[in-house]
C-alpha cells in the first residue's frame, strides 16, 4: 500500500498533483520563474543546486529528475554524483563550491550561516542576486523533497533513462507546460 491510498502503489509527482491540484499552478509558475527565468546563475547551475540539495536530502525522485536536468543543461550526471559523495573532491568549477557549500549549510544548519559563508560566495565572484537565487533554489528543493517523500512519490530515473527526443523535449518544456500536460493550468 502507498502512503496515500488514493494514489497508485508507486506514485509519480503527476499523480500527487492531479489528486491535490489546488496549489499546483502557482508552484509550477514559481518553478519556471526561479529555474528558467533571468538570473546570474545559468539554468544548468540552478538545476545543479536542485540536484545537489535533493541528493543531500536523499530524495531519489528529485535527485534523479534534477540530475537529469543538470546533465541536459551542461553538467554531466557523474559530476552531480561526485558532488553529493564529496563536494570538496568533486570535479566542479571551484567558483561553484562556495554556493554549493552555502546550499548545504542552509539545508543542514541554517542558523549557523555566517558572514564568512556569504563572503566566500562573494569572493568567488558571485553577486548578492546570485546568492539569493541559490538560496531560493535550495529552499524550494528542501520543500519539494518533503512533498515527494511525504507523499511516497517514487520513480527511478536511472532505471528509466530518457531518449534523446525526451531529453530535447525536457530542455524546452516549462514547468507550467508539465502542469497543463497533466490537466492542471
Image: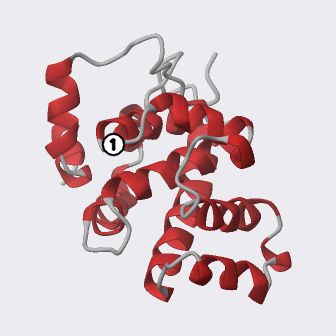
Tag 1, which secondary structure?
loop
Q: How is the image coloured?
A: secondary structure
Q: Nearer the viewer, residue 1 or 100?
A: 100
Task: List x then y, in percent, for residue 132.
Answer: 51, 80
Give the side of residue 150 with respect to residue 29, left or right.
right
Q: Residues within 10 Å of mark 1 (few under 14, many from 20)?
A: some
> From the viewer's perspective, is residue 135 above or below residue 83?
below
Q: Nearer the viewer, residue 162 or 100?
A: 100
Instruction: Identify the residue at horizontal 74%, vertical 41% (top origin).
Output: 86
Task: List x then y, in percent, for residue 174.
Answer: 20, 51
> From the viewer's perspective, is residue 30 above or below residue 13?
below
Can residue 163 be seen in the rendering of this structure? Answer: yes
> From the viewer's perspective, is residue 9 above or below residue 16?
above
Task: List x then y, in percent, for residue 172.
Answer: 15, 45
Instruction: Identify the residue at horizontal 19%, vertical 20% (top origin).
Output: 164
Where, by quadrant of the figure, is residue 124 drawn?
bottom right
The quarter of the image holding the C terminus is bottom left
**Which residue bears the numbered disc 1?**
74
> From the viewer's perspective, is residue 96 above or below residue 3?
below
Can residue 183 be seen in the rendering of this structure? Answer: no
The quarter of the image holding the N terminus is top right
Q: Tally the marks.
A: 1
Where, by quadrant of the figure, is residue 107 drawn?
bottom right
View extreme (top): residue? 159
Instruction: Identify the residue at horizontal 48%, vertical 26% (top origin).
Output: 7
Give the side of residue 169 with respect to residue 67, left or right.
left
Q: Nearer the viewer, residue 65 or 131?
A: 131
Give the side of residue 133 with respect to residue 166, left or right.
right
Instruction: Identify the residue at horizontal 15%, vertical 33% (top origin).
Output: 169
Task: List x then y, in percent, for residue 64.
Answer: 49, 30
Amino acid at each position: 500500500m502507498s502512503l496515500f491510498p488514493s494514489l497508485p502503489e508507486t506514485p509519480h509527482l503527476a499523480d500527487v498533483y492531479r489528486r491535490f491540484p489546488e496549489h499546483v499552478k502557482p508552484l509550477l509558475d514559481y518553478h519556471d520563474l526561479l529555474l528558467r527565468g533571468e538570473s546570474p546563475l545559468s539554468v544548468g547551475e540552478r538545476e545543479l543546486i536542485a540536484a545537489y540539495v535533493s541528493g543531500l536530502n536523499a530524495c531519489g525522485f528529485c535527485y534523479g529528475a534534477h540530475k537529469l536536468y543538470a546533465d541536459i543543461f551542461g553538467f554531466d550526471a557523474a559530476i552531480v554524483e561526485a558532488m553529493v559523495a564529496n563536494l570538496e573532491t568533486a570535479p566542479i568549477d571551484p567558483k561553484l563550491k562556495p554556493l554549493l557549500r552555502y546550499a548545504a549549510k542552509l539545508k543542514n544548519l541554517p542558523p549557523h550561516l555566517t558572514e564568512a559563508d556569504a563572503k566566500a560566495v562573494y569572493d568567488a565572484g558571485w553577486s548578492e542576486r546570485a546568492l539569493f537565487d541559490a538560496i531560493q533554489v535550495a529552499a524550494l528543493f528542501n520543500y519539494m523533497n518533503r512533498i515527494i517523500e511525504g507523499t511516497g512519490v517514487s520513480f527511478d530515473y536511472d532505471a528509466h533513462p530518457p531518449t534523446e527526443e525526451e531529453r530535447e523535449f525536457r530542455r524546452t518544456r516549462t514547468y507550467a507546460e508539465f502542469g497543463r500536460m497533466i490537466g492542471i493550468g
